[in-house]
Image (cartoon, coloured by chain):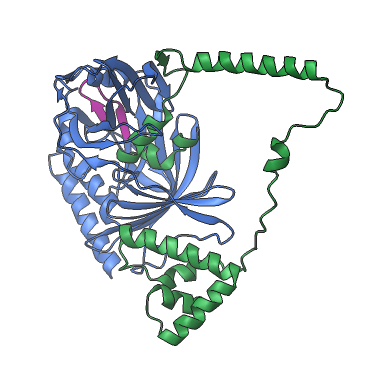
Chain colours: A blue, B green
Amino acid sequence: MYRLLISLLYVSLSLSAYALDDPWLQIDKASQAARKLNYKGIFLYQNYHDVRSIEITHFNNGSEEFARIITLDGPPREFLSRGNNVVQFNSNHENVLIQKRHGRNLFPAILPMNIESVKLSYRLRFGDQDRIGGRGAQIVYLDPRDEYRYFYKLWLDKEFSLVLKMMIFDQNQKVIEQASFNQVSLLNTQDLNWFKPNVDTHKKYIMDEEPNDKVSNEKYCTLTNLPSGYKEVSHVTRTIGNQPQLVHQWVFSDGLSFVSLFINPISKGQKSKVGQTQVGSSNIYAKVLKGHQVMVVGEVPLVTIQKISNSIHDLKEHQ
Amino acid sequence: MTEKISTLLDDELDLQSMDQTVSAITRDRGLRARFETYQLIRDSMRNELSDATFSSKSILDAIDKEPIQLQFIKPSKAASTMALPYIPFISWPMAASFIAIILIATVTMNHNYLKPSDSVEIAEEIPADFIKAHQLLAPSNIAYYSEADQR
């Protein structure tokens, strides 16, 4: 009954969205569908040369979201999430590492809950109709308004607006990242019996160290002239790797992509890092500024990374 | 026993049963390992995902029923691998030369290691710790669905 009501609600919303003039309603509906629908499916995720199958079970009881995500290829990895809290079980030959993390904007919920930031930075246009995982789909494009972000092509379920497939391209039309459902169906259950981890009693379970990041309100430097559309979503201090000194980390987002800026004073005897490189779909740029190590990492064009590295002002000289 | 461990974890066991269960866990290495696993998983999820949806019972239900394979700790071979092989035909002058070469090599290596701070190109030395730190805080697909930390 509940499922029927939800289905009817979405069908009626779907019809009304097509009837209304504002095409962005379709994107808003896609954002809501990934978070409000109950579904289970298997999708293929590709990042650079890394391809893997992933099973997702998603449930919303009306007030909260629950999800269980399992990687089906390679070393077993499992995520259980409730709201933004995620517990990850990372298995190797002997151990299972338990990590606590935070997560949002994961496929198929790649669109932010508030799409205003997306509207500012991307143009929306509609493409052809297609078929993904046995379901009819409407293709939509999110074209960047400038050079600081990638192109998004989305396949939205014609009935429920759920994102069935996504492709991210760079300026040269090279695929950066993609995900596509092979099969997906609505869940016809209200229980949460599935919401628990597989436990391998032959392995030793180890709790990973909690991230030591602390929210920072310190005015460490001034950041001006950031790439348009990118807003600060967090600023923390933390240690990184085995280095004892505190590192400031800012995360910026335009609603779809994320970039981290790291700044820390370079200790005596410590080698500084410079230059640029690419690891998978992540661009990385490093430089030295007034005795500080500056590092920018993100799944965005290199020009965005470089512009963020040039946005730092009022940094005190470190001897 | 599984049921009792579950009740023990939820602090709902009476005093006598608790005593018996704890004794059983203490005696049995397999039960002890299993108890620790339950506790760790339960605690990790209780904090982050709330105990409203989890009881120890639900986790125990998820656990494979087959018995735990006991793992025997093999005697350490560190001592034997650290010891230098005894070679009786090496004369003292030969040994002294050998030690001198090692000393020169060590001093040279330390000299290189202690040379003044300079820069390293990130293309040659990937800053994996920074990538991991970015992925832990930036909630993107790559952070969860890819294996960046193992590349």
Q: Residue at x 17, y 46 (%)?
A: A17
Foreground residue among A81 and B55: B55
| A80 falls in the magenta region | no
In this rendering, position of residue B133 left or right of residue A263: right
Instruction: Kindly tell me whether residue A123 is visible in this rendering.
Output: yes
- Residue A276's quadrant in the figure? top left
From the viewer's perspective, is A25 left or right of B116?
A: left
Membership of A151 in magenta stretch: yes
Left-right relation of B32 to A173: right
Look at the image and give the residue range highlighted in magenta.
Answer: A142-153
Quarter of the image containing the N terminus of chain A? bottom left
Identity of the residue drawn at 37% across and 76% down: B11
Answer above or below: position of A187 versus A52: below
Residue nearest the viewer, comparing B150 with A44: B150
Q: Quadrant of the C terminus of chain A?
A: top left
User: Compared with residue A146, is residue A71 higher up or lower down, i.e. above or below?
Assistant: below
> Picture quarter containing residue A138?
top left
Taking the spot 38% from the left edge, 74% from the top edge, the residue there is B10
Asked whether residue A118 appears in the rendered view, the answer is: no
Q: Position of residue B53 (x, y in %)?
A: 33, 67
Instruction: Pick whichever, B10 or A234, lies toward us.
Output: B10
- The x and y percentages for residue A26 are 21, 43
Above or below, comparing residue B136 to residue B50 in the picture: above
Looking at the picture, how far across and down is residue A63, in whole percent?
A: 21, 61
Q: What residue is rendered at 25% in x and 27% in y? A: A143
Percent position of residue A265, x then y: 28, 23
Number of marks in the rendered image: 0
Q: Residue furthest front?
A: B92
